């Protein structure tokens, strides 16, 4: 009988977790040299895929090697490529006699040319493989290492990074200073957050050029590490995605209440309402401020529209317990009035997606959110909103840590929107999206995202998975829509990307 194995390839390990996985592998009988042998062979295999068959007119492959095990992988890759007939040279940043341990052992097995650092050689190379620094990077590149990386970046050669481009922080996706710009990257066992969080993803060559080689690390290493970071891919959440059963009733599929927008952004709350329906909510009601009622009721067919005059009118709608999930923010207007509505919804214990103007209205009032919070809140800031809400958190240095800290501080789920949207849960779990195309950045798409999140929450999907699924579907719909997309296009395409 086949044993079902859970998929693990969406798990991300930080450089220190990866070091723990390597140590576990060694403790459990996979020797360090064997890991390095497989790592270097994996690099050589991917390099040969990019190079094509060896032939006499191929330009040199120059493998840059540094002081640590990343360089050791480079020596192994050199040996395989040379055996397979490619013209390979090593360019070592350090005196080979200074290498230690496994890297020294692998260097001894290399009997081909080892050049000293020579920038002119780089400009004539056909491929440059970067084995200078990997997960052991501990400070910004400077001096000769920085010069080599700069020369490599200026060369026309294809650039392949071993594990991580030298100079990139594998935990954050931020370059620490000068950084190798790879066209492709080969990493080992599992990816790291820095491979996916922008700009790291682009410095690694982009999602489709980031390869993972199996080096024999046992999956059981993950039991002790207990990973908390994940690539946002269906494997993370598809098991919890809600599907209507044959006997399901619209009331089983949740009822979302959307706070209606005000001039000039009436459409924002309409986009959220329709996105909630498209993601499977059974019913959606838009609560329209009285002066907007006629317009909203005329514009919407599938969404119910109810009018309210004052805060108590809006909050009074929540006396119907079936309205389990509320979207607050799109087009709502910034100020005391919106803040009071948010606090009211939260104190009534509803699931709430807090977006846009509702987030800005909460600046300096987050403490009250925390103390009144009986329900479940998903906050969806873009960078500007995040900075206003959490001015002390390290958004520029480490987006993943900033999102996690914001979630831990507030007890809310955080969707930090951007090129690689991060979803962070108060318990420390986080997902990193890597499927959104640049053209998703157009007015109104954030409103669609809050509606999708609310639609999934209303159907009972747990918040971390619901927010992650919503972010992935949103990106996938944008990919399918193509360039020139506008936010309302996403509504039509969403059904085509639902799992
Ligand atoms: N068993 C293992 O640990 C395995 C490790 N592997 C490879 O080993 C790499 C990690 O190896 P290491 O931990 O030796 O680290 P690295 O090879 O990334 O480099 C660490 C060395 O560089 C120095 N250093 C760091 N930043 C510097 C800077 N900016 N300027 C000058 N020197 C700097 C450090 O002091 C240390 O000597 C991985 O990225 C991967 O390529 C693979 O071989 C698979 C198995
Ligand atoms: N360069 C980019 N590449 C991919 N997605 C992006 C990029 N810039 C922004 N996005 C996405 O576009 C959406 C914009 O949302 P938001 O800023 O709230 O806009 P709006 O308020 O106009 O709806 C978010 O989902 C965000 O993740
Ligand atoms: K490297």
Image: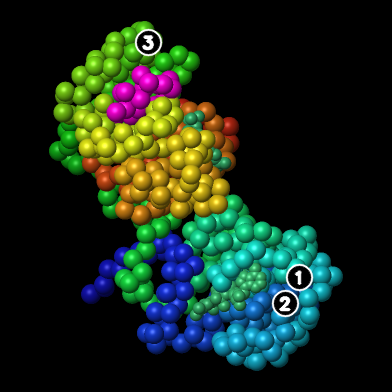
The answer to whether one can see residue 131 in this image is yes
> Which residue is drawn at the image coordinates 23% and 41% (left, top)?
460
Please state if 146 lies on the left or on the right of 433 as rendered. Answer: right
Q: Depth check: give the residue in front, 7 or 416.
A: 416
Within 10 Å of disc 2 (Cα), the crowding (few <14, some 14-19, many 20+) is many
SS at mark 2?
A: loop
| Mark closer to the observer (3, 2) | 2
Which residue is disc 3 drawn over? 292
- Give the number of marks: 3
In this picture, which residue range is highlighted in magenta? 325-343
> Which residue is drawn at the image coordinates 73% and 74% (left, top)?
62
What is the image's colouring?
rainbow
> Which residue is drawn at the image coordinates 84% and 70% (left, top)?
120
Q: CA distance from mark 1 to mark 3?
A: 65 Å
Q: CA distance from mark 3 to mark 2?
A: 68 Å
Residue 386 spot, x, y in % from top left? 47, 38
Q: CA distance from mark 2 to mark 1?
A: 8 Å
The answer to whether one can see residue 479 in this image is no
Task: Pick whichever of labels 2 and 1 is earlier in the sequence.
Answer: 2
Please state if 118 lies on the left or on the right of 187 as rendered. Answer: right
Q: Is residue 291 above or below residue 469?
A: above
């Amino acid at each position: 009988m086949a044993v079902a194995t859970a998929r693990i390839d969406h798990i991300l390990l930080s450089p220190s977790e990866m070091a723990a996985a390597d140590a576990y592998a060694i403790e459990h009988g996979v020797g360090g040299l064997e890991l390095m042998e497989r790592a270097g062979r994996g690099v050589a295999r991917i390099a040969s895929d990019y190079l094509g068959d060896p032939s006499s007119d191929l330009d040199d492959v120059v493998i840059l090697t540094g002081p640590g095990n990343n360089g050791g992988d480079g020596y192994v890759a050199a040996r395989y490529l040379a055996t397979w007939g490619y013209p390979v040279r090593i360019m070592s940043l350090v005196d080979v006699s200074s290498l230690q341990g496994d890297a020294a052992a692998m260097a001894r097995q290399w009997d081909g040319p080892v050049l000293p650092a020579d920038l002119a050689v780089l400009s004539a190379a056909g491929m440059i493989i970067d084995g200078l620094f990997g997960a052991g990077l501990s400070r910004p590149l400077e001096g000769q290492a920085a010069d080599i990386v700069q020369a490599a970046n200026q060369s026309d050669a294809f650039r392949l990074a071993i594990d991580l481009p030298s100079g990139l922080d594998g935990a954050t996706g931020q370059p620490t200073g000068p950084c190798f710009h790879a066209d492709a990257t080969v990493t080992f066992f599992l990816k790291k957050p820095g491979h996916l969080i922008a700009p790291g993803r682009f410095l690694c060559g982009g999602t489709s050029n980031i390869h993972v080689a199996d080096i024999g690390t046992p999956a059981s290493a993950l039991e002790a590490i207990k990973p908390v970071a994940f690539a946002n891919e269906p494997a993370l959440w598809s098991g919890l995605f809600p599907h209507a059963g044959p006997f399901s009733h619209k009331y089983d599929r949740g009822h979302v209440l959307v706070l209606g927008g005000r001039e000039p952004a009436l459409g924002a709350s309409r986009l959220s309402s329709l996105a909630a329906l498209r993601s499977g909510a059974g019913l959606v009601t838009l609560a329209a401020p009285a002066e907007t009622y006629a317009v909203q009721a005329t514009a919407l067919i599938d969404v119910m529209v109810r009018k309210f005059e004052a805060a108590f009118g809006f909050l009074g709608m929540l006396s119907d317990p079936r309205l389990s999930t509320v979207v607050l923010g799109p087009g709502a207007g910034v100020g005391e009035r919106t803040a009071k509505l948010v606090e009211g919804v939260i104190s009534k214990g509803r699931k709430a997606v807090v977006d846009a103007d509702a987030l800005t209205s909460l600046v300096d009032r987050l403490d009250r959110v925390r103390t009144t919070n009986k329900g479940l809140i998903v906050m969806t800031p873009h960078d500007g909103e995040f900075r206003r809400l959490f001015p002390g958190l390290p958004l520029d240095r480490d987006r993943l840590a900033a999102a996690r800290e914001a979630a831990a501080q507030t007890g809310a789920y955080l969707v930090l929107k951007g090129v690689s949207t991060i979803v962070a849960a108060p318990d420390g779990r986080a997902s990193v999206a890597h499927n959104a195309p640049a053209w998703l950045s157009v007015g109104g798409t954030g409103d669609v995202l809050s509606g999708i999140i609310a639609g999934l929450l209303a159907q009972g999907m747990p918040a971390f998975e619901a927010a992650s699924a919503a972010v992935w579907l949103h990106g996938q719909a944008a990919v399918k829509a193509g360039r020139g997309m506008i936010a309302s296009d996403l509504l039509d395409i969403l059904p085509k990307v639902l799992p």
